[in-house]
């Protein structure tokens, strides 16, 4: 059939389902059979089937629908068949635009579940459009509420994790590549070295550090870092271990504009932190001050906000007399409130130097030892992740092929035997992919001694000794310190469970 021929004998068929679930494929078939029968009854020939897997609340991005409307305005057919008005649109803006185009081009609308001639009944058409829009708004509200329940349980509801993390079973986990160290480096460059976000982006480009989008294999991902990406990392509280969600939401179902939520959902310590809360807070203060004035003076005392009292839980304060730290409760109220002892700064430094140096010897951590093990593990992780991506891409193509086969069968483009053979072949391929994905899922579950060494090596990267202890090093290695008595100290490290 020459589709450019203008005439009154041809009709278009619009079939739409809302999701990508395989269970919706039967809806394609059901809609086609109903519309095909009605089309024959009305004496029309099929011009084309316009099929969509998309929500009808969208104003933009409906390529098949837009193509159908363009063909309608070119006079390629004189009727449109759809199951009901909700298949055409679930918002009044698109509904009224659709109606205007249909009437202007004298095209008949056959919505088989609606009353005849509804396109010419302004009251009924408007009522149905309003009802469909209300249904979508109500459904959107229910979905939002369901997501809020998941958020309050501490589940990570976004599909994409912040740079340095990955999502597994609705939780965030620190990546075992170099991305966590890059996050720490970004904070260090900004806060300790005073570099701006654009300067940091340029520095990472010069060092050939792949940006987040490129690492995740996004389509059309750029090859360069940008200041906006750096700022997003510097202001993302997820790096402290807190999960903050529901910070904003769309103004309505049919618009992309969003509004800020005054009370987001916050789950403290939902996952392992990459940086300390103190470092993050210091960065936010510095960022605010930097926007309106010169860089503030660096933090004066080495262990400020890191030491807690083992007796009362209060923070320790620095005292210049004796270069020591004492419990805040004791400093304010004396022994009647807390009898905890002071601890000298040089004693703390000596303890930390000794424990970290012993750890290097225990696990043989240095820049040259175990390089072969380190590289093998990285290659293994890369190979597994790369194979997963390829398998998932193949699986998606096979699922699409199944949907197309179903439509081809009902349109009688292929026989029942051809359909059964093709579907069986696709099912076998999909089953094989699922089996292989299960194997890959368990391929890297067990953490071996070598993997422990590798993870610690990444934590200790670039450090050969601890002769000099500074604040950046403390933030990198230490969560907090508890003092229970005279020189009785518990040091809680970030790399220990």
Image: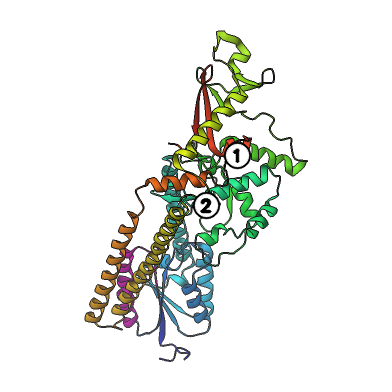
Identify which residue is drawn at 28% across, 79% down: 409
Residue at the image point whose x is 70% and y is 49% from the top = 196
Could you tell me residue 197's position as x and y percent? 68, 51
Nearest to the eye among marks 1 and 2: give it.
2
Q: Main secondary structure of the magenta part?
A: helix
Quadrant holding the N terminus = bottom left
- Residue beneath label 2, please? 178
Question: SS class of the residue under badge 2?
Answer: loop
Q: Is residue 393 above or below residue 440?
A: below
The span shown in magenta is 14-41
The one nearer the camera, 490 or 431, is 490
Residue 23 in the magenta stretch? The answer is yes
> In terms of sequence position, does the residue under pointer 1 or pointer 2 come before the other?
2
- Where is the C terminus found, in terms of image quarters? top left
Q: Is residue 442 above or below residue 52?
A: above
Q: Residues within 10 Å of mark 1 (few under 14, many from 20)?
A: some
**Foreground pick, 117 / 202:** 202
At 53% across and 41% down in the image, what residue appears?
A: 264
Instruction: Tell whether position 296 is magenta.
Output: no
């Amino acid at each position: 059939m020459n589709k450019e021929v203008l005439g009154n004998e041809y009709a278009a068929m619009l079939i739409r389902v809302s999701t990508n679930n395989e269970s919706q494929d039967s809806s394609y078939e059901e809609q086609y059979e109903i519309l095909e029968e009605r089309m024959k009854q009305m004496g029309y020939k099929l011009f084309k089937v316009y099929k969509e897997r998309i929500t009808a609340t969208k104003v933009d991005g409906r390529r098949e629908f837009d193509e159908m409307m363009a063909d309608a305005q070119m006079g390629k057919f004189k009727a449109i068949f759809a199951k009901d008005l909700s298949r055409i649109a679930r918002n009044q803006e698109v509904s009224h635009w659709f109606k205007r185009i249909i009437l202007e081009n004298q095209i008949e609308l056959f919505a088989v579940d609606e009353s005849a001639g509804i396109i010419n009944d302004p009251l009924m058409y408007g009522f149905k459009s309003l009802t469909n829009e209300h249904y979508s708004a109500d459904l959107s509200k229910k979905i939002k509420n369901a997501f809020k329940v998941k958020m309050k349980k501490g589940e990570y509801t976004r599909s994409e994790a912040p740079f340095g993390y990955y999502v597994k079973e609705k939780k965030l986990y620190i990546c075992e590549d170099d991305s966590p160290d890059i996050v720490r480096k970004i904070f260090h460059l900004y806060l300790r070295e005073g570099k701006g976000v654009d300067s940091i982006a340029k520095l990472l480009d010069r060092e050939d550090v792949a940006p987040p989008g490129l690492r995740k294999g996004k389509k059309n991902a750029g090859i360069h870092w940008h200041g906006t990406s750096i700022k997003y990392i510097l202001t993302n509280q997820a790096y402290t271990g807190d999960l903050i969600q529901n910070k904003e939401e769309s103004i309505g179902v049919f618009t992309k504009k969003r509004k800020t939520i005054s009370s987001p959902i916050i789950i403290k310590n939902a996952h392992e932190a990459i940086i300390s809360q103190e470092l993050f807070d210091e960065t936010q203060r510095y960022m605010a001050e930097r926007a309106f004035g010169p860089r503030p003076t660096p933090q004066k005392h080495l262990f400020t906000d890191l030491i807690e009292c083992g007796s009362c839980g209060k923070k320790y304060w620095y005292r210049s007399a004796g270069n020591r730290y004492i419990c805040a409760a004791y400093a304010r109220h004396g022994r009647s409130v807390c009898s905890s002892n002071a601890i000298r700064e040089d004693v703390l430094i000596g303890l930390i130097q000794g424990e970290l140096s012993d750890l290097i010897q225990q696990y043989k951590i240095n820049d040259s030892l175990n390089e072969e093990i380190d590289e093998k593990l990285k290659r293994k992780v890369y190979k597994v992740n790369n194979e997963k991506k390829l398998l998932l891409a193949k699986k998606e193509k096979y699922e699409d092929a199944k949907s197309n086969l179903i439509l081809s069968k009902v349109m009688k483009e292929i026989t029942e035997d051809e359909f059964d053979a093709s579907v069986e072949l696709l099912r076998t391929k999909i089953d094989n992919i699922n089996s292989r994905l299960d194997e890959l899922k368990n391929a890297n579950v067990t953490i071996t001694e070598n993997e422990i060494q590798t993870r610690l090596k990444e934590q200790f990267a670039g450090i050969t000794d601890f002769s000099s202890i500074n604040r950046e090093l403390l933030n990198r290695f230490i969560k907090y310190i508890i003092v229970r008595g005279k020189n009785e100290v518990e040091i809680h490290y970030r790399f220990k469970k």
